[in-house]
Amino acid sequence: MIAVTGLRKSFGERTVLDGIDLNVPEGTTFSLLGPNGAGKTTTVRILSTVIGFDGGHAAVAGHDLARAPDRVRAAIGVTGQFSAVDDLLTGTENLQLMADLHRLGRADRQRRVTELLDRFDLGAAAGQVASTYSGGMRRRLDLAMTLIGDPRVIFLDEPTTGLDPRSRRMMWQTIRDLVAGGVTVFLTTQYLEEADQLADRIAVLDQGRVVAEGTPEQLKRGVPGGHVRLRFADAAALTAAVGVLPGAAPDEEALTVQVPGDGGVPALRRLLDRLDTAGVTVESLSVHTPDLDDVFLALTGHQHEEATR
């Protein structure tokens, strides 16, 4: 649904995107992570036709970004970092305005507005001006406005910044529902847990380049710190396990052994086969992998700080 090859963008002498490649399948959530200034918002602005680019090729929903920007705009919706809601209008009026901009007929406009108010649990507040809405309600209205045109691709640029945990989780469920309905979501976020929860694939952007890409689990397995913890029934089994597992770090009091590993199925199978061959019985095991904070730090060299505004 989104295909990018060698995308480049500079502002004056500052190179913001230095030849990035992205490929986003239809009906998935793709998350772009990176430190502040890495080029995330610039990427969204380019792919949503807000600004141009200096080199490379990009297509969205099968339309060439440079040759058919109008067709790209017809296929996408954008929810930016800052709400597009008009505080002087009611919830209904905000949605009607977007419907008029999409040139929907009167019947289609009313149907779509009513449907979205119900879908985002805004019906009770539909007649209130948006300035009275809570942060979570404003964000839901903002996303509802994005969906008026029934887009195939939605760009969400830090959509939950500033929301309380409950509102953020409600937004997460909304995004999951959209993807389940076949919509493709391109997400940038400051919250690494958000990417972990939502993204089918993640690309990490640093200094204008994609430094890693994969599923959340693939990225977490790719950095040091992963291990398997094995628990045994008695000290004899613990001692025997230490003797056959290279790099094992025992905890005699807890009757556990910690073995470095990525937690993947092949590695687990080899580890358990080795214990089985030695006649050692494992009582229980758990896999511990680094989280996305560890991935972020390892790949970008920056300590991640969640936005608190």
Image (tube, rainbow, N blue to C red):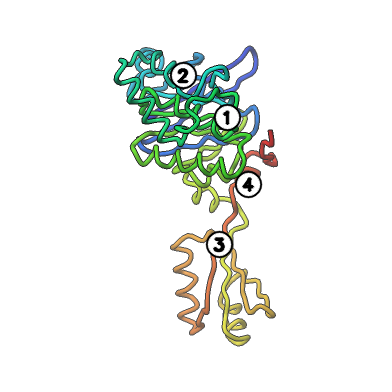
| Picture quarter with the C terminus | top right
Is the residue marked by circle 3 packed among few (<14), some (14-19), or many (20+) residues within 10 Å?
many
Q: Nearer the viewer, mark 4 or mark 2?
A: 2
Q: Which of marks 4 and 3 is in front?
A: 4
Which mark is first along the chain, 2 or 4? Answer: 2
Residue 241 location, x and y as percent?
Answer: 57, 79
Is the residue marked by circle 2 packed among few (<14), some (14-19), or many (20+) residues within 10 Å?
some
Looking at numbered disc 1 in the image, what kind of residue is underneath it? Tyr
- C-alpha distance separating marks 4 and 3: 18 Å
Which mark is first along the chain, 3 or 4? Answer: 3
Q: Residue 93 bears which disc, if any?
A: 2
Looking at numbered disc 3 in the image, what kind of residue is underneath it? Gly
- Tell me if label 1 and label 4 are in contact, CB under 8 Å: no
Residue 186 location, x and y as percent?
Answer: 46, 32
Is 250 drawn above or below residue 129 in the view shown? below
- Residue 175 appears in view: yes
- Horizontal placement of 129 versus 96: left or right? right
Which residue position holds label 3? 261
Q: Residue 133 bears which disc, if any?
A: 1
- C-alpha distance separating marks 4 and 2: 41 Å
> How many numbered discs?
4
Q: Which of marks 1 and 4 is in front?
A: 1
Q: Which of 81 and 280 is in front in this view?
A: 81
